[in-house]
Image (cartoon, rainbow, N blue to C red):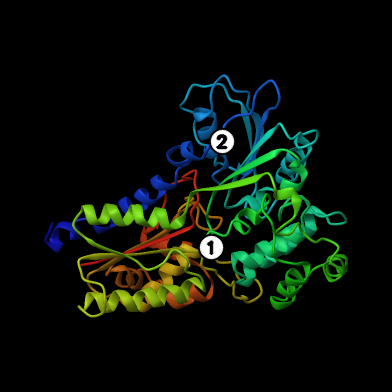
Amino acid sequence: MSLSPLTFANDPHTLLLGLYHAAVQRALPIHNTAAHLPTPPDPKKGRTLVLGAGKAGGAMAQAVEALWPQDAPLSGLVVTRYGHVPPRHTGLPERIEVVEAAHPVPDAAGLKAAERILELTRGLTAEDLVLCLISGGGSALLTLPAKGLSLEDKQSINRQLLDSGANIAEMNCVRKHLSRIKGGRLAAACAPARVVTLTISDVPGDDPSIIASGPTVPDASTCADALAILQRYAIKAPETILQALQSGKWETPKPGSPVFEAHILQMTATPQQALEAAADAARAMGLNAYILSDEMEGESREVGKVHAALARAAAKGRGPFQKPCVILSGGETTVTIKPQPTGSPRGRGGRAGEFCMGLAQGLQGQLGVWALAADTDGIDGIEDNAGARLGPDSLSRAKALGLKLDIHLQRNDAYTYFAALGDLVVTGPTYTNVNDFRAILIL
C-alpha cells in the first residue's frame, strides 16, 4: 500500500496519538490475562488468594475477577496508585479488594496495605494457591520498611533516588534491601502455598526481579550492591541503614532458595509487545515502521538528542529509515534533577517531557518531523499529563511566546514549556504500565 505523505500530514498528531493508544490497548490486562490463569485448587482442600501491587493492579484484579470461574472461591487484596482503579463494567460481585496509595514516594496508605497483604499470607498451606498480580509502580505502593526503619526513612531515600539519575534497576536494588516484603520476601511469606505470579513488565529487559522490586521472585543482588548504589549517588541515609547493609543483615532470598520451588511466573504484557502493536497500526496505514529498542536507558534529554539525529537523517533521505515512516522506541530513561538557585521554583515534568525537550533541541525545527513521547500509564512523573508532542513549528511558536528551551531544560521544567504551547498529551490513567512510549513521524 502506498500513500502520499499528504495523507499523513493532514493530522500527524492524531496519527501519533493513535499509535500510542494501540500500544496501550495491547498492554491492558483484560486483553492478555486469560491465557495465563492457573487452574483453581480443589475448593474442598484449598483456597485462592489474590495479592498484588502496581499501577496496573486495579485493572489486573478486575480482569482476574471477570475471567475466574464464578463457582471457584476467590479473595484478596491489591494496591494501586491513587486514581488508577478503572471503572467497573462487568456487573460481577467484587471479590478482590483494591486499595490506593501514593506513587512514586510511598505513604502511610501503602504501608498499611503492605502490612495487610503480609498478614493475609498467614496460615497458607500447600493446598492453597496465591495469585500475585505485579506491575510497575509496585515498589512505592508496596512499602514495608525493614525492622528498625521508619516510613520517613524510606520516603527520604526514595526522593533522593528519584532525583539522582539512578536507573530503575539501581533504585529497586536499594528498595529491595530496605524492605520486609520486596526482593522475594512475599513469596517466602506465602510458602508452602503454590504461588503463580502474573506480571506486566515496565523495565528494560523484562527482568522480573526488577519489576516492582520483585516481591515474589529470587533476588541475585546483595546488600553490598545496595550500599554501593547509595554511595555512588551520594544518597544521605541514617547510620543504621549503612550498618545493616554493611553487615548483610537485610539480605534477600536468593536463586535456588526452597521458598521458590512452588512458584510459576507468567509475563502477560511487555514493552516490546506494545511497540509491535503500534508498528502494526502504522504499517496498516501504509507507513514504514521501525522499532529501535524497547530497552533504552540514559538521560532523557540525551536520548532525545540521539533520536533527533536519526530523525533528521531520515528526513533528508539518509540512513536506514525510509520515509514516510515512524520510528518507535521504549525503555526507561532517567532525569537527573539539577540544583537550582535558592528560592527558585522546582521545575515540573517527567521523563517523556524531558525527552521531548532534548528532541526539540536536536531537531531545531526540522521540516517533516513530528513526535510524541508519553508514559504508557498515562502519567509523566507526578503531573497530570502522559507526555508531550512536537512538530516542525514547536520552536518557532515557543519563541513567539518568549519561551527559552535552554532555560526550561536547566530547570527540568518540561511541563510548563509544553503547557504554554498547548502540546501536553493528557490521557488520564490508562490502567496499565509498560513504560516509555516514543514515536517519531517522518514525512
Q: Which residue is mark 2?
A: 38
Element type at mark 2: loop
Q: Find residue 233 and report its horizontal and vertical position in percent.
A: 69, 75
Q: Does residue 441 sit above or below 40 in this rendering?
A: below
Q: Nearer the viewer, mark 1 or mark 2?
A: 2
Is 117 in front, or is 14? 117
Amino acid type, residue under disc 1 in the picture:
Arg
Q: Where the C terminus falls, by quadrant?
A: bottom left
Residue ID for mark 1: 348
Percent coordinates x, y for residue 353 in the rendering: 45, 64
From what the image shows, is residue 367 above or below residue 268?
below
* Residue drawn at point x = 54 percent, y = 21 percent: 70
In whole angstroms, how far apart are the C-alphas of marks 1 and 2?
43 Å
Where residue 340 appears, as percent x and y from the top left, is 61, 75
Regarding mark 1 in the picture, which secondary structure is present there? Answer: loop
Horizontal side of 202 relative to 290 (left or right) equals right
Indicate the quadrant containing the N terminus: top left, top right, bottom left or bottom right: bottom left
